[in-house]
Image: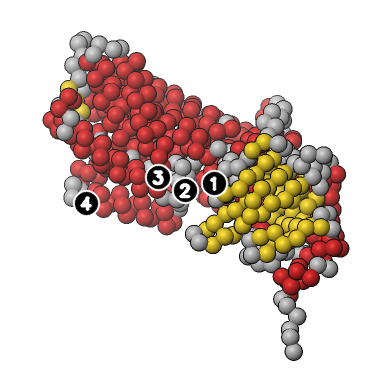
Amino acid sequence: MAPILKLDRLTRYFAGLAAVKDVSFEIEPGGLVGLIGPNGAGKTTLLSLVAGSLSPTSGRIEFEGRNLTGAKSFQAVRAGIARTHQIPKPFRSLTVHENVEVGLRFGRLRRTANHTRTAVEFLDMVGIAHLFRMPAFLLSVGDLKRLELARALATRPSLLLCDEICSGLTETETGLILRLLCDIRRAGTTILYVEHNLRAIMSVCDPVIVMNYGQKLTEGTPGAVQNDPSVIEAYIGKKAMI
Amino acid sequence: MEQEAPVGVKQGGDAGRSLLSRYAPAVAPLLVLASLAALPLASPGPNTVRLLFVTLTLVTASVGWNLLGGFGGQVSFGFAVFYGLGAYTAALSINGGIPPGLAFLLGAAVAALASLLVGLPTFRLKGPYFAIATIGVSEAVRVVMTNLPWTGGASGYRIIEKGRFFQMHHYYTALALAALAVGISTLVRRSKLGLALIAIREDQDAASDLGVNPFAAKLLVHALAAALAGAAGGVYARYAAFIDPDGVFAFRNGIAILLMPIIGGVGTIWGPVIGAFVYGLIHEEVVAYFPQAHLLIFGSLLILIILFEPGGVMGLLQTSLRFIRARSSVGSHS
């Protein structure tokens, strides 16, 4: 099957620092791909490059066979890529359903007969339909993360980029979000999932890509990656020599 | 039906109140419009009509500014540019034999085009660049117009119209334009563009991440806002029959156009209207009584509003309404 996303030697410098350097990988359609790595490995930068929030210094991004290198984020959305943010970015003065309506009305499928009803369906999917009239600034962190997800889904992406969607959530909430991601994948959306919480990622993702210092370290099944010596070294350092 | 029930006196009162609160937002504006339209019945003096005329042109500019600054969160100090360009375009057109209605439209079009010149380079940037650029552009345009011999330079430009002067004719033109501006503002607020603008105001990156093209939305609403300010300038110019760069392009006009929505309630439909009436009706009195200190007074007013009621008059009204409702519900339970 042709890959849905193909990165070729993707590089992004911030001044002299290579936040992402020569990263190449492919994602098969229908996958739930994990992207892990220590702090500062370049995971979020990579996600922002794919989402169009940042433009690459060099390299190429191909999405569904189209060249999306240098596309702005709203163009990426219209092509079918949506993202969530690690720190939720709600439109604070808008209500919860209006937040989702932005995604509905400006996303890939712009024509919906009843925006409010469709918005509520997306809110129901993430479990916060009862909050639909509430202004977004009143929401708790957990609900904001769900709103973030509902909004991104409302743009009808074929590739969803999730940035640490479980950080700051309780164990129960994490479980619910992970189950939701599996449901979304089953419904046909490919997911690239950046996460710090290794247990979360290992339980749902296949394959897993590991980054360190802006470069791709390795890629494989959760089991193989967990036992890879270079990955262990990246996370907990070299074995001390006595 | 409930109100006709003989035993339902109290019930009828309740129904009346809920009816009032339901239809007040739609009826109040119509009442205001009707009373402004019925102004001749009060046989006002020419000075009152002049004051109301000027206030109505201010309403249009203020409502226009609010589209960009209130809904879209893009603060501009440079609306005097559009007001002045509209005034000069209309003046030149009328002297060239173009009918006034078309001349106002041309004024709006020139202002909208000029808005692109400011917006194209600055709306790609985030942060305060747009606001800063508007200050520079405003002064630059004023200086150019002061030295442009073609329009009389600093000595100004006179509009010569044959026929009698009907003050009420001008008044109704300004009233119709102000009503149109409020109508456009209401439509924008309810439209897809309005949703995009508020999303941009709240978080431009997040809006873009959901498919909104911030550059296009800001450019579009800036042009719309400039067109309204330009039309207001044109209507004013025809009435005044004489305009000069220090009058219409003055930086203080740009400040006034920004001040009015803030007084009334930025980002609301009616705030800019209320703010324009407050400013328009008291401004001349304040200048007359405190010729040296009027800027100090308006500056202090601005600081007080931002510190204590950022929602302006509309915010104050909402807070007091909530207070009254809370009080009355406590009263009915006890």
Q: Which residue is mark 2?
A: B126
Q: Residue drawn at (52%, 40%), measured in percent from left and top?
A: B214
Instruction: State whether discs 3 and 4 lie on one chain.
Output: yes
In this rendering, the label closer to the viewer, 3 or 4:
3
Q: Residues within 10 Å of mark 2 (few under 14, many from 20)?
A: few
- Image location of residue B82, percent across then percent down: 33, 32
Identity, as a three-letter code, of the amino acid under mark 3: Phe
| Distance between the alpha carbons at the discs numbered 3 and 4 | 30 Å
In the rendering, which numbered label is found on residue B293? 4
Do the residues bearing badges 2 and 1 touch, measured as CB atoms within 8 Å? yes
Q: Secondary structure at mark 1?
A: helix
Pick whichever of labels 4 and 1 is earlier in the sequence.
Answer: 1
Task: Quadrant for residue B53, please give it.
Answer: top left
The residue indicated by pointer 3 is B130
Mark number displayed over residue B204: 1
Residue A62 location, x and y as percent? Answer: 67, 41
Element marked by disc 3 = helix
Please tell me which of labels 3 and 4 falls first in the chain: 3
Q: How many marks?
A: 4
Residue type (three-letter) at the residue carrying disc 4: Ala
